[in-house]
Amino acid sequence: MSATQETVSAGGARTARYFIYAALIILALVYLLPLYVMLSTSLKSLDEIRGGDMLAPPRDPSVAAWVRAWGEACIGVSCVGIKGYFWNSIKMVVPAVLISTLLGALNGYVLTKWRFPGHKLVFGMMLFACFIPFQAVLIPMARVLGTFGLSNSTAGLVLVHVIYGLGFTTLFFRNYYEAFPDELVKAAMIDGAGFFRIFWRILLPSSGPIIVVTIIYQFTNIWNDFLFGVSFSSGTSSPMTVALNNLVASSTGVKEYNVDMAAAVFAALPTLFVYVVAGRYFVRGLMAGAVKG
């Protein structure tokens, strides 16, 4: 290849790289724009919101709307803010994520290392659960919650999310454990290790990447869920997403857009925190599962 051709090729590659960077920056700004609007609006006064530009930064930033959203905003007939609903979501998400992750790991362990006749059929049926729409399970779930006396309770929402998420968590762990060396499990059996000892001492310590993936996936889905929350809870037992909807949809009094945005930021903070802290581990876990699977 001549020197001229090499120069033209290098110039074309550089131009393509600049084009890709520009496209990525534009897309990042598009995705970050709603977050900027939420934050800037929550820091403005109502007069500034009504008379100013939505994209303009706040002239006199104030956290008064945040304080009001947290402890004073009216949701329904109760003006106690969203803090109670925020903790409702925490009490729902933490056990639901931990239980569904642990059960998914056990299912994946059994389906790959303790295979039984019909294990493929069982896995296929659990996989089918991943594709059942939320709306299709509302009535059966309502009957189950009513039978067990868990209607309109945080425990009932935990049960719903554990059942619905079990198909996904089983899929994640089953694919991850499929490539785990069977020789290690057989060697442990020869040494006298039993079912749970192998799981706790060998499989689970080696499952860090897929555990992170499962926790992030389940946490995001459960925290952001609205349909199950509005269907199986009411009043003070509602999760954060339902309270946020009731706050924003309220048609009485003065519409406080800054308070609505502050409440929306509160609702988004946990998932943002999870992605900022563990986002890189999420990608690594997916890649580890892809390579091993």
Image (tube, rainbow, N blue to C red):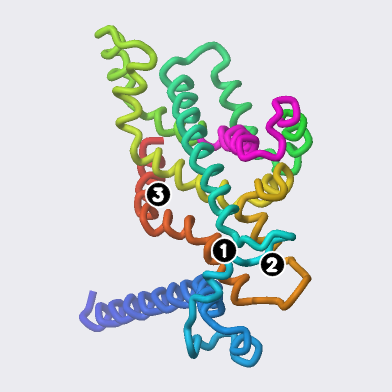
Front in this rendered view, residue 282 or 117: 282
What residue is disc 3 on? 282
Q: Residue 193: which numbered mark, if any?
A: none
Distance from Cα at disc 1 to Cα at disc 2: 16 Å
How many neighbours does mark 3 have within 10 angstroms: few (below 14), some (14-19), or many (20 or more)?
Answer: many
Q: Classify mark 2: helix, strand or loop.
A: helix
Compared with 5, 183 (above or below) is above
Discs 1/2, front = 1
What residue is disc 2 on? 248
Q: Earlier in the sequence, mark 2 or mark 3?
A: 2
What residue is disc 1 on? 71
How many neighbours does mark 2 have within 10 angstroms: few (below 14), some (14-19), or many (20 or more)?
Answer: some
Quadrant for the C terminus, please.
Answer: top left
Discs 1/3, front = 1
Compared with 184, 92 (above or below) is below
* Farthest bottom residue in view: 51
Q: Earlier in the sequence, mark 1 or mark 2?
A: 1
Q: x and y percent of residue 195 in the render?
A: 38, 14
Q: x and y percent of residue 277 in the render?
A: 36, 55
Q: Which residues are magenta?
A: 145-169
Q: Is residue 130 visible?
A: no
Distance from Cα at disc 1 to Cα at disc 3: 34 Å
Q: Please name the amino acid that badge 1 sits on.
A: Gly
- Quarter of the rendering containing residue 196: top left
